[in-house]
Each structure stands twice: as structure tokens, then as C-alpha cells.
Image: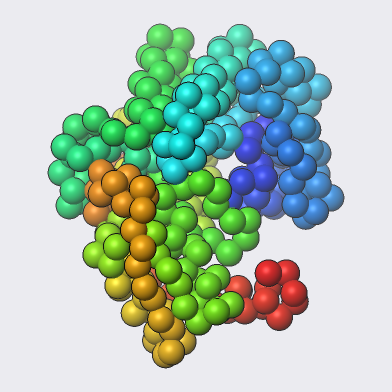
Amino acid sequence: MKILITGCAGQIGSELTLELRKIYGNENIIASDIKEASKSIMKSGPFELLNVLDKEAMRNIIHKHNISGIFHLAAILSAVGEKNPMFAWNINMGGLINVLELGKEEKLERILCPSSIAAFGPETPTENTPQETVLRPTTMYGITKVAGELLANYYVQKYGMDVRGLRYPGIISNGALPGGGTTDYAVAIYYDAIKYGKYTCFVNANTQLPMMYMPDCLKATIDLFRADKKDLKRFVDYNVGSMSFDVTELANSIKKYIPNFEIDYMPDYHQAIADSWPNSVDDSCAREEWGWKPSYNLDAMTQDMLKAIKIKLDKGEI
Ligand code: SER
């Protein structure tokens, strides 16, 4: 199977591309983004510059490389989306509709387009948020995620397409930095702990959100894409949980390894976004239907993150 990835230079795309190349072979994973990606992506396999709003350019890439699957990751995240709502709407919905329409027209075998915990809103139950629940987000990013779930499901029902998706929690990683999300504090805190021994957080101490470490994110994404279709009862909106902690617990985990680490708080516009999202999610459908099971807990992730970021610092990369 030849697969196109949009948004390959982003936080998830930059690692997912390399992981998929290991599984499917370098030449079968066509990475694309609106800008050049990391050296490791550019060197290890095919890359195409692509603006996801340019449907015909995307079609040409599908033809050129004989693509039959797409991971559609190009999107604007919540914080940037609140600064520029129309931009978020245009990129997120425009990109998705192009991918879905091309999926239909070019008879693609399978598409994966992620959703997010941002699909939930202040009226959603916050603890162990059910799979089927109130979806009334208050951010433009969340609105594009709910609309995206509905749209993707429409293509599944109306055209019999195979479109899959999962609601990512905040993703924590030490490769490419996240750009413009609300959960970015849970990545920045590790970098600042290593670089400066302290961090100023843009949400308050008791802000709790569902989070996931990148190796688990890659596993969830790839396992859902490769799951046997006959095992799936739903397609586009699987809750996937892993861990859930507030900022104090996150800081305390770091203090176990950097005892002098200090944190202070200057909540800003991110706070309202974070407050509108759940504390934890019920992911039993993902567990039952395609065997989802995370591997990392908070302390295991903290040890791994601190080690990896220290290496980057020692090499002069940050
Ligand atoms: N990490 C995303 C954000 O913060 C949520 O999906 O916007």
C-alpha cells in the first residue's frame, strides 16, 4: 500500500512518517507538507510540497505515486485557531473535504483523519467522558473536529468509504515541537525544566487534561489504521485515553528527577480552552474493538522525556 501523509512536518507527522516508513518501506510513504520537513524525513523517502487546500495538486500526487491510503494530519490547532478562527475553519475543513472527495473520486482504500478531545465542550461530562456524549465545543478548532467527524462519517455511510479517526488527547513528545495547541504546556515544561530548571505555565496548577506519550500515539494511530474492518463498529471518533494529570502532578513527576525544578503560573487565554475539555476519557470501545492499550504512565514518560531532551541540549540542538 502506498500512503500519503499530509502535515508530515508537524509534531505527530514528523514521527508517524518515520514509523510508517519502517513498516511499509521508505518508498511507500509519501510525506507532504506546506514546508520542508526534517532532514530525516527528506532523506529517507519521497516528499512533496503540498497545500491541502489545493485539491488538484493533491490529486496529482495521488496519481504520481499511485496512492491508496492517506493519513490526513495537516490542521490548525486550538490556540492558533482561537487567534484566527476563520483560518482554522478554512484549513481544517477545506483540507478535510479535499481528502474525502479525492478518496471518493480516486477510490482510495483507506483514510485516517484524527479528531481530538477538543470535540468535547463545557457541557460534556468531564470525568471518564463517554464515547457517545454531548459534542458542543466552544473553540473553532473543536467545531472543525466535530464537523470533521460528522463529515467523515457521512462519507463512510453514503459512499461506503473506509475512513477512520481517533480523538487524540494532548500529545507529549520530544521530536518536533507542537505548534499552537493548548496542551503544548505539557511539552514545554520538560524543555524548560532541562534548560532553565523552571517553567511558567499558561494554565493554572489544577488544570487536568487527558494526555498521551508519542510512542502510544503512534501505536494507536497505526493500530487503528491497520485494524481489521470487520472488527470496527464505529469508524471516525474513537476515544483513546492513556494518562490524565493536572499540572501539579506533572511538575511533581519532574521534581522526582530534577529536585530543584520550580514552576509558577500565569494563566492566559489558554485557560478557558483547557477548562472546556474533559479531565479523562472512557476508551473502552477502542480497547474492545481494536485492542487499544497504552504503555506509558506519567513517570515512565517523564524519565524518557528528560533523557531525550538532555541529549538534545548536550548536542546543541536546543
Ligand atoms: N493538542 C491539541 C490542542 O491543544 C488538542 O487536540 O489544540
The residue nearer to you, when weighing 12 against 157, is 12
Residue situated furthest right in the rendering: 43
Answer with left or right where residue 227 lies relative to residue 233.
right
Q: Is residue 113 left or right of residue 136?
A: right
Q: Is residue 280 left or right of residue 17?
A: left
Q: Residue at x 29, y 46 (%)?
A: 272
Whole-percent x, y for residue 316 in the image: 74, 74
Q: How was the colour assigned to the protein in this rendering?
A: rainbow
Mark count: 0
Residue drawn at the location 60% of the way across and 73% of the way down? 309
Placement of 64 over or under 220, stated as above or below? above
| Quadrant of the frame with the N terminus | top right
Is there any visible trace of residue 245 in the rendered image? no
Residue 49 position by quadrant? top right
User: Residue 197, percent across and down?
Assistant: 50, 82
Q: Name the residue rendered at 63%, 56% in the picture.
A: 176
Kindly indicate the quadrant of the structure image that contains residue 58: top right
Residue toward you, 240 or 97: 97
Q: Is residue 90 visible?
A: yes
Relative to the observer, which residue lies in front, 264 or 28? 264
Q: Position of residue 96 (x, y in %)?
A: 52, 23
Q: Residue at x 39, y 59 (%)?
A: 202
Relative to residue 282, is residue 49 depicted above or below?
Answer: above
Question: Residue 84: image x %, image y %?
Answer: 48, 32
| Quarter of the figure that contains the C terminus | bottom right
